[in-house]
Every structure is written in C-alpha cells, then in structure tokens.
Image (cartoon, rainbow, N blue to C red):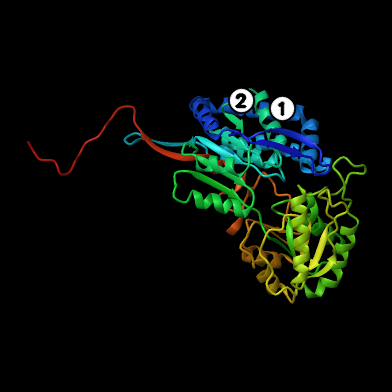
Amino acid sequence: MATDLVSTEPATGSEIWHGTSGNVDAAVERAREAMRDWAREPLGRRIELMRRFANQVRKHSEQFAELIARETGKPLWEARTEVESVIGKVEISITAYAERTGQKKLNSALQGTAALRHKPHGVMAVLGPYNFPAHLPNGHIVPALIAGNVVIFKPSEKTPAVGEFLTRCFHEAKVPEGVVQCIHGGVEVGQGLVEHWMVDGVLFTGSARAGIAINRKLASDPGKIVALEMGGNNPIVMLDTPKIDDAAATIVQSAFTSAGQRCTAARRLIVVDSVFDKIVPAVKELAEKLIVDEPFADPQPFMGCVIDNGTADLLSESFVALMSRGGKPIMHMRRPDEKLPFLSPAILDATEIHERPDIELFGPLLQVIRVADFNEAIYEANNTRYGLSASLIGGKPEDFELFWHEIRAGIVNWNRPTNGASSAAPFGGVGLSGNHRPAAFYAADYCAYPVASTEMEQPRASIGVGIKEG
C-alpha cells in the first residue's frame, strides 16, 4: 500500500514536494525487462548517453542548484558546486571505466586467445543520502550505467525532490526510463530493495547503523555485490606551525562546511600541548565570524541549517550530554529559532571526558582533545572504530610520513582539510566507514565483474596420456 510522503524546506518549513512511496516489485520487474537491451548497447552508445545527461544537467544547472539549496538548507554557492560535481562525474567515470575495467587479449598460435572482459552485475539498487542528494548517488549511478547495469535509485526520504530531478535529467538525455528509475519511500522501501532476490547489487551511502543492517541482512547472500560508504569520526591532528591563521581556516573548513554534514567532516581536533593555546583561540575566533543563514541570503552564508528539527534536537542534546560527562564548552551550540534547524558552530574541550563516545555526530560540533605529544596524538586519532578521513596540520615531512603509515583511514591528508575529496581518486574508508569497496574513481570496480576467457575458432585438442591402445 502506497504511503503519502512530504518534503519540506528545512530553512523555512515550507512544503517543497509531495508524492507517494513506490512499488519495489514493479520497479524491479521493469528493471529486469530493460536490463538485457541496455547491457547489449555498445559501450560507445552508453558513454554518449552519459554525456548527453551531463549536458542536460548543465542546461538546468541553476534550477537544479536552487532545488538542492531549498531541500537541503545548504547555501546556494555550495549547491552550485554540487551540480558541477554531478556534471564532472561523467568524464571521470568514463576514464575510470577504461582504466579499471579495460579489455585485454593475449594471442597464442597453439592455445588460441586468452581474453579479459567485464560484465555488468544486472539490477543495482542505489540508496542515496540527504547531505549530497545529487552528487553522491550520481557517483554510483553513472559508473553503473556505463558498465551496462540498470539502476533503481531510492533517494533519501528527506530529499526526494532532488532525487526525482536527477532521474529526470537521465530520461531527458534519452536514457530509457526502465534503465534508471527513481523510487520513493522510507526504511521499508529501502529494505525491500536490499532484500529483493532479483536485485544484483546494493550501493549505499549513509549512516553506519543503516550500513551495518544492510551488511548483516546480505551476509548469507554472497552473490549480491554490496558497496557501503558509512561516514566517520574523523580526526584532524595539530602540530606546531608558524601558519596559525591558515591552520585555523583549514580546521574550520574541515569541521563546519555543510554545517558539519559531510561524512569526511572533522569531528575531533587533536592538539599537542605546545600549540594548544595558540590554535584553539584562533579557531574559536574564526568560527564566531561564520555567517549562518538561509540558502539565498545576501551576503551568502558560510553554512546553512542542518537537515531537520529532529537532527537539530539530537545535536543540541549531544552537546549537553558531552558537557555532563566532563566536556568544557569553548563555543556553545546555539539555536536561534526552536522551530527551525539552524545551529551555530560549536566547539567543546573533550580532553577530560573519560570515555568519549565513538559516534558520528553529524553536524557542526567539534570536540577538542589536548595531548602531550605526537605519539599520543596518533593513538588518539586511531581511537575510533571508523576510518574514513584524517588530516595532519603542521609538522615536518617526516611527521607526515609517520602519520600516513600509522593512521587507519582511507583518506590521509597533510595541511589540507579532511573534506573536499577528489572524484579523480578512490573514496572510502576502513572499519565502520566502509567495506573495502571505495567509490569515486574506483566505483568502476564494483559496477562490473571480470570474466576470463580462452578462445579458439575451432576445437583443437588431444589426450596424450592414459589412453588405451587399439
């Protein structure tokens, strides 16, 4: 039975979209019908259609950016960068497919031809998040389509309008409607797609809790490809540097861009004692200057609101809970209007918290931890079940060499933010951050599987041992 769904603008509370939940069985059946013809389309034709899709997004870019800003609450400038990422993903994915899943042939006069080719998996379910509702699912969809898969895309129930718009751009580019479908719904629709016996793969971006549930559900089904990207409790480690203002800007970018709603956002600032009294006041001073406002405000804000009131409530409660455990507020989290999910950036000294909760607080909340030296900083940085992104600020080349070797993370940066990863590189982590199937440039790896062949135009064989005479 279909369920009525409504999406509202978090910055205003106004309704932006309404619709009904989709029928999983009908979507899968339609995808299976489209699968055979799409997989047999020449690769050049599939690539041509992806480029047409990029042109459609480009054609609607401002309208698309405005929709993303309205439905997520992020500033318009940031929504525009997301649209550019959607467009850029096409050429990156074409290059990645050629590099990661290329064909090979080895000819031998006596043994025929040894060949390596790749096949699509079939029907892929893409489960998208709300923080980058176009860019992140698109990072699965485009590589999957290039490889010859068909896609059933379930956007986050918090950003269905963006998901619908993205799908419409594929259809306007003449990608058949059965090849890319958008299906709306909540947890039950997502579960239906994950469990469906005719879905061949699940490509997920979201929370660790949801990703673990998917992994557990499919543990007994090894035939289904599963790629999980699940966020992080990311550390940024601060050593001595003469560039305090630059370091503060890097930390603020890491912690508070997108109102902290990035899986690569810095959650923990780990500072050696010798620089603590210089960097923490500088970070606070800069964070206090950040403009927090609605997406279309003038001047443009650095950050907007979080996704909804429930999230704002949880983050506010988490800040208070950390204080009750011994955390010392450096910069209080404030909520100007209880009816809207705007939060000010918050900074808290968590050094004295005996057992710091190892959770991803998905918002503008930075915990500061004071340590004696670099070795203790590395220990503290690795004191998490997650392992997505980590950055070292300051130090010498040999310090970064040690940091790179010791840190458990899929992205390890030096004097750069923890966020803002390049789509031209692999993107993924270890531990609760992923299941060793990195996305971005390496998405081609989980969108097709290698097939080895030995081939001859005519059978030619003989048995030289163990044959009776006569």
Image position of 146 (left or right of 119): right
Q: Indicate which disc, 1 or 2, sits on the residue closer to the N terminus.
A: 1
What amino acid is at disc 2? Val
The image quadrant where one finds the N terminus is: top right
**Residue 349 visible at all:** yes
Q: Please indicate, yes or no, whether residue 416 appears anywhere in the rendered image.
A: no
Q: Is 309 placed above or below 325 here?
A: above
Is 116 rendered above or below residue 257?
above
Secondary-structure class at tag 2: loop
Residue nearest the observer in this picture, 252 or 203: 203
Q: Quadrant of residue 375?
A: bottom right
Proximity of marks 1 and 2: CB atoms separated by less than 8 Å: no
Residue that carries the numbered disc 2 in the rendered image: 175
Tell me if mark 2 has few (under 14), some (14-19) or many (20+) residues whose alpha carbon lies within 10 angstroms of its own.
Answer: many
Between 109 and 268, the one lying in front of the other is: 268
Up the image or down, 105 lies above or below 187; here it is above
Q: Work out how far the residue at label 1 is from the one at label 2, CA to CA, in angstroms.
A: 13 Å
Position of 182 with respect to 243 (left or right) is left
How many marks on residues? 2
